[in-house]
Image (cartoon, rainbow, N blue to C red):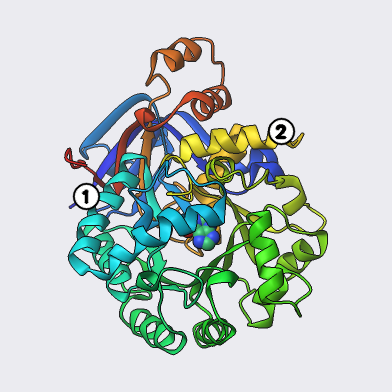
Amino acid sequence: DRSRVVIGRTLSFLGDPAIEADAAVRYEEHGAVQIGPDGRIVWAGALADLPEDARALPRDEHGAKIITAGFVDAHIHFPQYRMLAAPGRDLLDWLERFTFPEESQYAERPHAEAAAEIFLDRLLANGTTTALAFSSSHLVAADALFAAAERRGMALATGKTMMDRNAAPGCLDEAEASGVDSRALIAKWHRRGRARYCISPRFAITSTEAQLAVAGELLRDNPDCLMQTHLSESLREIETVKALFPNDPDYTAVYERFGLVGPTGLFAHGIHLSESECARLAEAGAAVVHCPTSNNFLGSGLFDIDHVGDPRRPVGVGLATDVGGGTSYSMIETMGEAYKVAMLKGRRLSALRAFYLATLGNARLLRMADEIGSLTPGRFADLVVLDPEATPVLAARDALSASIEDRLFAMMITGDDRCIAATYVAGAVWRGTAAH
Ligand code: GUN
Ligand code: FE
């Protein structure tokens, strides 16, 4: 029985603060979240209004800490968990020299099983309760990750990576087999408990036309599945796509031709998209996922959040670590990096909007907003408890903070995993695994 009341400052979003302003934000200085026996939220609001029948329940008192929905990472690579800080000259060099050899290890189920536990521990240690993860091309690796997440009660989306050319043989599959394996995994895992399947062609460079066609058929037959890939990340990548697909007018058109640009599509990076590409992505209801620490580390370029999200034809924008191209598992650090990238582009990213993107915004893109992403009755109690005084720098700053916005801003600029005071998965506190 997970029934309890979690008490502290509570923060939740109903919508995008950039669009709906203050109406999108629910904040209680003395707030409470009531969790039911099944680990779902029963009630959330001001502590003073706590329902009568909840007053005798066990209490987790978090004082001046901030309770919000667990972070959602909209793009991360499971088989790259030990690759952070592999120094590539650019994306393609980094993939060839470090990434493909590393991912080849995931053909072995025991390796993938051990890695899955470490990977999920790292997510939870950083307050990330749900991720949309790339796996490797091996069926056993995606299967192991789904199983590990299920044992922990986590909502997770992943899929077997489809890649049948231009990479090391050990991490490649074949077009037809990739369809067979994907279908087997969809049958086993999609909507089993909290799992969601994501059809996952790696990117245009590593799939033949035959395989992209298989991916398109998979999506047509399973329109409820998510679809993820990479798009318009680095200039050399874009040139290579041009050479491989000379008859398509641009990079996005390659995916369009195979039926891969639809409302459940999440396209990672999208740094160098033209106006036409953005308009077509918006028209299709597809989303672009901003991965700032990765883009900076690999020198891929500066994402323009106001160009992609232009309100005249807004493309949905997600936020993600992209570990191991990304340099941190922390969505807090990722928000801070996104803020700096916005500044360098002459844009602004408010702390409230950054926290929205990392919670409800990403949950919406993963089609999970009816289950996670906010402190709303009926949603799972996947929570993160944030300490706005976790470090000496933050403690000093907090004394001068007048508002929740000040506190969130200070955390996103100087905070990291030290700010994570607790992580709840479906109402249960994650206790951590010291070895990881
Ligand atoms: N494009 C294709 N594969 C990858 C990958 O693993 N990481 C990043 N950052 N970009 C990619
Ligand atoms: Fe990626």
Residue 286 seen:
yes
Q: Quadrant of residue 238?
A: bottom right
Is label 1's Cβ within 8 Å of ligand 2?
A: no
Residue depicted at 63% across the width and 74% down the height: 262
Tag 1's secondary structure? loop
Q: Residues within 10 Å of mark 2 (few under 14, many from 20)?
A: few
Q: Quadrant of residue 282?
A: bottom right
Identify residue for label 1.
2
Q: Is 52 rendered above or below residue 156?
A: above
Residue 363 seen:
no
Residue 195 percent location from the top left of the image: 35, 68
The amino acid sitting under disc 2 is: Leu
Residue 183 percent location from the top left of the image: 39, 85
For residue 344, the mark is 2
The amino acid sitting under disc 1 is: Arg
Tag 2's secondary structure? helix
Task: Look at the numbered discs 1 and 2 and tell me whether their residues touch, using CB distance below 8 Å.
Answer: no
Residue depicted at 53% across the width and 23% down the height: 410
Q: Is 287 rendered above or below residue 221?
A: above
- Asked whether 205 or 316 is in front, the reply is 205
Q: Quadrant of residue 143?
A: bottom left
